[in-house]
Amino acid sequence: MSRYTHKPDISVKLSPRITRKTKRLIDQICRRHEMFEANVLRFCLEAIVPLAAKHGMTWLTRQIPGFDRRRVLSLSTMFTVRTSRLVKDKIDKLSGYGRGEFTEAEILRYCYDVILPIAYRDGFAKIMAMREKNLG
C-alpha cells in the first residue's frame, strides 16, 4: 500500500451565508491560483481555525480591519465547505468561548474575512504553510 493513498476524513459540511465582496474575493483567488473553490475554502479554513481556537474570538475579530459587529451585512450568497471533524470541533470550541455569543456562521465569516485577504495578497503558499503548521 502506498503512503499516498490516505485521504483525510472530510465528513463535515458547513454552509454560511456571505457577502458579495467575500464571494468576489474567493473567485479572484480561485482564478489567480487555478484552484477549485472547494479546495480554496477548505485549505483557508484549516489554516485559520486552529489559530483562532488557540487565541480566541477577541483575537480573531481584532484581525479584521474596521470590524464592527453591529454593522448590518448584506448576506447575499451562500457557499458550502467540507472539512474534518477536528476543524468542526475547534469551531464549536470558539462558539463556546463567549457562552454562545457567536454563531457558527459568524465565526466562519470572521475566519474568512481574516484569511482570504492574506491568500490574495501573499499567495496560497503562505496559507498552505499556515495550514501545515496549525494542523501538524
Image (tube, rainbow, N blue to C red):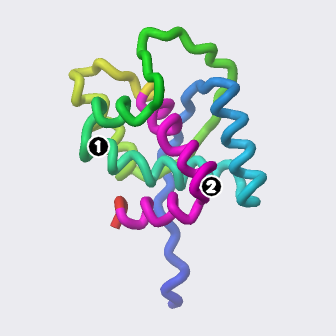
Question: Which one is nearer the viewer's eye here, 23 or 36?
Answer: 23
Q: Where residue 21 sits: x, y (%)?
A: 67, 28
Direction from residue 46 to residue 75 in the image, left or right:
right
The residue at 62%/55% (across/down) is 39
Dot 1 alpha-carbon crowd within 10 angstroms: few under 14, some 14 to 19, many 20 or more: many
Count of residue discs:
2
Per the picture, the main secondary structure of the magenta-coloured stretch is: helix
- Looking at this view, name the residue that lies furthest to the bottom: 1
* Residue position marked by numbered label 2 in the rendering: 39
Badge 2 marks a residue whose secondary structure is helix
Badge 1 marks a residue whose secondary structure is helix
Bounds of the magenta segment = 107-133
Q: Is residue 78 above or below residue 1?
A: above
Among numbered discs 2 and 1, the one appearing first in the sequence: 2
The type of residue carrying mark 1 is: Ala
Q: Where residue 4 sits: x, y (%)?
A: 54, 82
* Residue position marked by numbered label 1 in the rendering: 53
Q: Is residue 65 above or below residue 121?
A: above
**Magenta stretch containing residue 129, yes or no?**
yes
